[in-house]
């Protein structure tokens, strides 16, 4: 049975092993002294706390380029998220297969949510349509929304929204690149300054490296 020690896990995570053991104790996983943690059971405990041991039906609204890419993403199923329906406002998209599923029209949104017991919705629509879609999702019973639309959504208490803005993520990366460039420039300045130091001068000009005998 594969096991892993708290020291190995701490080193991989970049944290203190004592803190890691304390955090794991809240999961009810204490491990075995001299042996470590049962890997399979530890993964189960963490997955259970994250809500990944049950099936979460999800609807994706807005099946443009981004919505279609999300529908084709294979990582959802392995984490317990099942794409229950793909929904779009374009009548020409209705019935079109995307990721092996037929796209359904937004007129069916409320029925789809109720029939599938959906509590998580993904919005990948243009900004102008996002709030209306959000309102309909919430009214139909959705309580968690992942928003890819470039706009801020207004929701009532009890509804959680996570916003994914790719441009902001790129800006964060650009900031780190700018900072690294500044640090590299600062590191090279002393060497450049040293090369530019004027040579020692004597009464007749530069002092030669080797004085004549």
Image: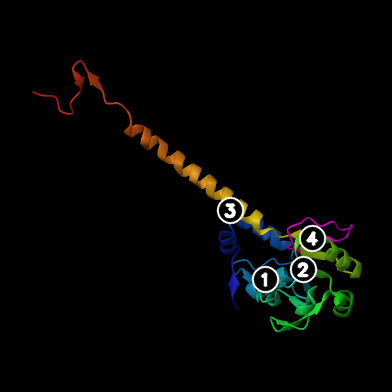
Q: Check disc 1 and report its element: helix, strand or loop.
A: helix
Q: Earlier in the sequence, mark 4 or mark 3?
A: 4
* Viewer-side residue, 50 vs 118: 118
Residue 122, numbered circle: 2
Residue 32's quadrant in the figure? bottom right
Segment tinted magenta in the rendering: 147-161
> Where is mark 4, residue-wise?
128
Magenta segment includes 158: yes
The Cα atoms of the two marked residues, 4 and 3, are separated by 27 Å
* Viewer-side residue, 181 vs 81: 181
Pick out the residue farthest to the front: 92
Residue 173, numbered circle: 3
2 or 4: mark nearer the eye: 4
Label 2 Cα neighbours within 10 Å, binned few <14 / some 14-19 / many ≥20: many
The Cα atoms of the two marked residues, 3 and 2, are separated by 25 Å
3 or 1: mark nearer the eye: 1
Q: Residue drawn 76% across and 56% down?
A: 151
Residue 100 position, x and y percent, is 70, 84
Label 4 Cα neighbours within 10 Å, binned few <14 / some 14-19 / many ≥20: few
> Where is mark 1, residue-wise?
65
Q: Earlier in the sequence, mark 3 or mark 2?
A: 2
Q: Considering only vertical position in the picture, is 70 above or below 164?
A: below
Residue 82's quadrant in the figure? bottom right
Label 1 Cα neighbours within 10 Å, binned few <14 / some 14-19 / many ≥20: few
Q: Earlier in the sequence, mark 2 or mark 4?
A: 2
* Viewer-side residue, 80 vs 49: 80
Q: Are marks 3 and 1 in contact (CB under 8 Å)?
A: no
């Amino acid at each position: 049975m594969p096991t892993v020690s708290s020291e190995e896990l701490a080193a991989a995570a970049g944290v203190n092993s004592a803190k890691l053991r304390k955090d794991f104790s809240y999961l009810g996983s204490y491990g075995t002294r001299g042996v470590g943690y049962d890997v399979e059971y530890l993964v189960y405990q963490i997955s259970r706390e994250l809500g990944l041991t049950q099936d979460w039906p999800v609807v994706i609204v807005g099946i443009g380029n981004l919505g279609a890419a999300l529908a084709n993403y294979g990582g959802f199923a392995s984490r317990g998220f099942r794409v229950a329906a793909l929904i779009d406002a374009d009548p020409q998209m209705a019935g079109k297969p995307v990721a092996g599923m037929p796209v359904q029209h937004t007129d069916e949104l409320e029925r789809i949510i109720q029939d599938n017991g959906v509590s998580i919705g993904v919005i990948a629509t243009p900004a102008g349509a996002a709030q209306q879609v959000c309102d309909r999702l919430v009214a139909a019973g959705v309580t968690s929304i992942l928003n890819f639309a470039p706009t801020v959504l207004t929701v009532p208490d009890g509804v959680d929204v996570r916003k994914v803005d790719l441009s902001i993520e790129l800006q964060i990366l650009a900031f780190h690149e700018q900072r690294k460039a500044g640090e590299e420039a600062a590191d090279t300045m002393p060497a450049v300054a040293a090369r530019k130091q004027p040579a020692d001068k004597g009464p007749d000009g530069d002092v030669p490296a080797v004085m004549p005998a």
